[in-house]
Image: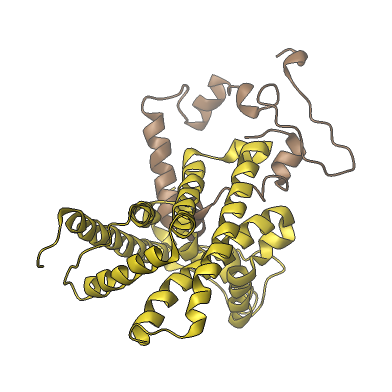
Amino acid sequence: MDNLDFVSFMYVILTYAAFAILIIGVVWKIIVYAKTPMPVKIPLTPAPKTKTGAFFRVLGEVFFFKSLYRSNKSTWVGGYVFHVSLAIVLIQHVLRHYVYDFYHGNPPAWYNLLVPIGLVFGTLILISLVYLFLRRIFVERVKFISVLSDYFILVLLMLITIAGLSEIVFQSPAALEKSVVQLDAFFNKLFIFQPFDIPHNPFFLLHYTLVLILLAYIPFSKIMHFVGIFFSPTLAMNDDVRENRYTDERTTRLTI
Amino acid sequence: MSKEHYHIHKLTGKIQTPKLLRKGNQASEFTFLALEEDMETLGFPKKLQEGWQDKAVGVFKELLDNNKALKTYMDICVRCGACTDKCQFFLGSGDIN
């Protein structure tokens, strides 16, 4: 904890706080979902009869958004493009850090591909978010069911993407590389609880602050759908009630 | 209730999303109260009682704690709207609530 300037000190505290809220919140919600009883088997028919079938059904949901594809293809385009591009950008973020560390500062030639990948897929994220936002405003039936948090989360994600893209677009590659190298040290030291200075690049700090807000907001929002989908009774249950009777003793405590 | 207040949703053979009218076709606008003698015979209170909102919320909380589907879906529903044009109740009645 030596010679941190004020900005770095604030950001170290905010980083630890945001990740703590995220991890504790998500674990708490997982426990709550696991403990809630389910009195009746309600897999949506046609339902798989075996647990393996139910497992592959959930995988189909996670990797291809299969039920959304079959029900509303235009929504599927927006949602799927957003999620896939976001996954690729997140992998690119993590990869850039670990590849740099792995090669001890002398990365191979394909390292230079990572920034253009971030640019292309970041733009795709922004386009799909704008598409989903316009859909939420102009399609009457979706507007009727939307609440403030739906618009808020779309706007927050758009701002994060714009801030991240602005890092690439409005800076020279050398300046970007410099802040990335300083960032490597910042995160490495955070994991071992020895705080280090954060790069003072304003584009980066804006992007990072918005990301921390998003992380702290996740356990309280509908983004928990990445956890809930595994507990969803309409997808994860198999249809074998004729062979094996299904009961859940915990539901007897219902008083209504 | 005079007929001109109602908007009766016509069912043709084709399935099409009804227009989202906010007045004139919602069940909550035209509540028919039960007869007081019937309520008395059944042992229910005759009028809406004090604190009914808290009781209703309490019942919903108990449902939430005892049904994994309800709890999960209330949390994770992303309001994508893919269900809205398929809901049998909406398609059949035109009532957006």
Q: How is the image coloured?
A: by chain
Q: Is residue B12 left or right of residue A152?
A: right
Depth order, front residue of A106/A85:
A106
Where residue B71 sits: x, y (%)?
Answer: 46, 55
* Chain A: drawing colour: yellow
The N terminus of chain A lies in quadrant: bottom left
Q: Residue at x 67, y 49 (%)?
A: B83
The relative height of residue A57 versus residue A7 in the rendered view (above or below) is below
Q: Residue at x 40, y 46 (%)?
A: B61
| Residue A40 seen | no
Where residue A251 sits: x, y (%)?
Answer: 43, 61
Q: Is residue A193 left or right of residue A53?
A: left
Q: Which chain is brown?
A: B
Where residue A47 sits: x, y (%)?
Answer: 68, 71
Q: Is residue A122 left or right of residue B18?
A: left
Q: Residue at x 67, y 45 (%)?
A: B84
The relative height of residue A83 versus residue A109 in the rendered view (above or below) is above
Where residue A30 sits: x, y (%)?
Answer: 39, 65
Depth order, front residue of A44/A98:
A98
Q: Residue at x 55, y 69 (%)?
A: A117
